[in-house]
Image: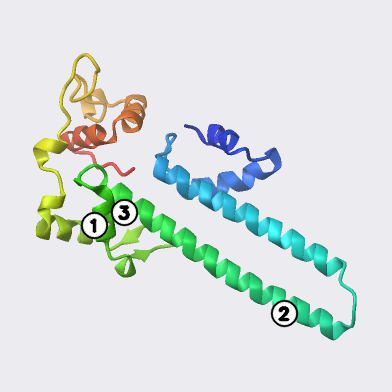
Amino acid sequence: MTITELLAKLGIADDKQAEATKIFKEFLDGEYVPKSRFNEVNAEKKNLESTVADRDKQLKELKNAEGDIEAFKQQIAKLQADNKVAAAKSAEEIKNLRLSTAIQLAIGDTAQDAELVASLVDTSKLILGDDGKVTGLNEQIKALKETKGFLFKTEEETKPKYNPIKGHGNPKVNPFAKESFNLTQQAELIKSNPAEAKVLAAQAGVEVNF
């Protein structure tokens, strides 16, 4: 899905698309958008719209305010305090959503029960950088695989099986391989079968993150 298609699906007005595109590009690194990232961006869009609406309402109240200067100052101080609390709450919600998205992507389809494995990750020990990267997550997933291996699928279970009728599994041509490198086929495979894409990328010696 392209950014233009995503903007249309979200119903963002034309005069807001430039700002929305800037926000989306902080999280999107390709033409296709995984569902977890779509949910994350959609949540940020709703938070942004809510914040703008709140500010507009407050400005309108201030313009219509009557009374002495002292009362006016008190009203401004209250609005500033309320905004600070709302901003902190919004930032925490977005942080938790980003961490949740990162955990889901890190686990992928390797777990027997993705929700159960995700609940075992100690988010208090994760560090979310300004660039969106999460430090400490891979180490926790690796530790869980070593100490609670029964929660994860075996290599045989995660290996895609070839089905010539459906066209899934290891195709004759690996779009990640040097001799048959094809970005369009890579994108289509990542969208339709992320697990298979990871396997083929690994076979070609290429590291992919999505």
Q: Residues within 10 Å of mark 1 (few under 14, many from 20)?
A: some
Look at mark 1 in the image and give the residue it sits on. 138
Discs 3/1, front: 3
Q: Where on the picture, by quarter, is residue 139?
A: bottom left
Q: CA distance from mark 3 to mark 2?
A: 39 Å
Q: Can see residue 132?
A: no
Q: Are marks 3 and 2 in contact (CB under 8 Å)?
A: no
**Which comes before the other along the chain, label 3 or label 2?**
2
Q: Is residue 89 left or right of residue 193?
A: right
Q: Are marks 3 and 1 in contact (CB under 8 Å)?
A: no
Please provide percent x and percent y for residue 196. Answer: 23, 32
Residue at the location (52% across, 51% down)? 43
Q: Residues within 10 Å of mark 2 (few under 14, many from 20)?
A: few
Q: Residues within 10 Å of mark 3 (few under 14, many from 20)?
A: many
Query: From what the image shows, is residue 82 above or below residue 104?
Result: below
Q: Which label belongs to residue 103?
A: 3
Q: Can see residue 17?
A: yes
Colour scheme employed for the rendering of this structure: rainbow
Q: Which label belongs to residue 77?
A: 2
Query: From what the image shows, is residue 200 above or below residue 71?
Result: above
Q: CA distance from mark 3 to mark 1?
A: 9 Å
**Which comes before the other along the chain, label 1 or label 2?**
2
Q: Is residue 137 left or right of residue 57?
A: left
Query: From what the image shows, is residue 71 above or below residue 37?
Result: below
Q: CA distance from mark 1 to mark 2?
A: 44 Å
Residue at the location (46% across, 49% down)? 40
Q: Where on the picture, by quarter, is residue 191?
A: top left
Residue at the location (14% across, 44% down)? 153
Classify mark 3: helix, strand or loop.
Answer: helix
Residue projecting furthest to the top = 165
Classify mark 2: helix, strand or loop.
Answer: helix
Nearer to us in this view, 117 or 140: 117
